[in-house]
Amino acid sequence: MKKKNILAFGAGIIILAYIIHSLDPEKIFAALLNTRIEYFILAGLFYFLNDVVAAISLKIITSTKISIKDALISHMCGMLYSNATPGRVGYYYTSLSIAKKTKTSKSGNIGILTLFQGINFLMKVILCLLAVVYFSSYIIDERSQRYLLIASVLPIIGVILIILALYTNISNRIICKIPVLNKSIEYIHRMQETVRAVKADKIMKLIILALFGWVFMSAQWYFLAASIGLDISYLTTLMLQPLISTVMFVPISPSGLGLAEGGTALLFNAIGLTAANGVAFMLLVRINSIMVDLFGIIDMKIHKKD
């Protein structure tokens, strides 16, 4: 693990430990230990369906040469890496894995994956705005309002940066002026050429699939809430999901470790649940998702053989 990742992981652990200590550690761990297994498994099945949707999206946007099964394993392994890296940048492993399997350009696949993430951010912009409207009657304290603002602005910034990088020459001009980076300009051009060749109908398919992914992930969250006895409607989890998952992209700790738990504590408190419930729930989301994505280890073994 790189030094900066170790520091980021340390920061996340410190934030998480502080949050748990500030609340009620006994209640948090009691909720986790008393999780109802049948709901936990059902939540994992819906998360797996979300992984399948992502694999179909990758096949559509990268290469018809790759099977959905191979795309699925690449995606799951990428998700494992994303959980261990700030800003979830480890997910770019997926593009390298697919490039190997399809004998296509690595830089082109990185560009395609950036577009894929851009579409997901665009969906989060819309969904976060819907969530703000939905929670506006609940949120009255200043801290929760700030959280809503940050969660809504982050995907907008992400979409703008991705558009500038892939569809304009602004980033190219900046990179050319930096001696350490100017040698990579050829790869940037390849990324841009590959992305600009993607047709509008494919992008529309990805948007529709992203909506299915949102529905499946929200179902995962609904059943995880039920597994620890929380009375939350499915509509509420639909609105919570984009607000909390967006914060996982903040590049301070791996997958927003500590930050997402803190945000969930704030939102749960605002909707009449306890902050301790929020932390326990978010930890359960992480555990459930990682356990499903562990199948991605198969991809690591395949590449070791190669």
Image: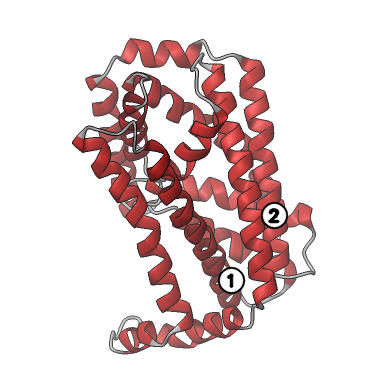
Left or right of residue 238: residue 9 = left
Tell me, for residue 276, which label it has, or none.
none
Tag 1: residue type? Ile
Q: Is residue 106 left or right of residue 302?
A: left
Observer-nearest of 76 and 214: 214
Q: Residues within 10 Å of mark 2 (few under 14, many from 20)?
A: many
Q: Give the image location of residue 180, x and y in percent.
A: 31, 81
Q: Position of residue 280 (x, y in %)?
A: 42, 22
Q: Is residue 159 above or below residue 51?
A: below
- Which of the marked residues, 2 or 1, is nearer the chain's N terminus? 2
Which residue is at the front of the view, 267 or 112?
Answer: 267
Residue position for label 1: 112
Which residue is found at the position 54% from the left and 31% from the top?
Answer: 221
Q: Would residue 15 be seen by someone viewing this image from the given angle?
A: yes
**Depth check: 206 or 140 in front?**
140
User: For the residue carrying disc 1, how many other residues have a C-alpha within 10 Å: few (<14), some (14-19), or many (20+)?
Assistant: many
What is the secondary structure assignment of the residue under circle 2? helix
- Residue drawn at x 72%, y 66% is 60
Which residue in the protein does label 2 denote? 55
Q: Residue 186, position in %: x, y?
A: 49, 88
Residue 84 visible in the current orientation? no
Disc 2 to disc 1, C-alpha distance: 14 Å
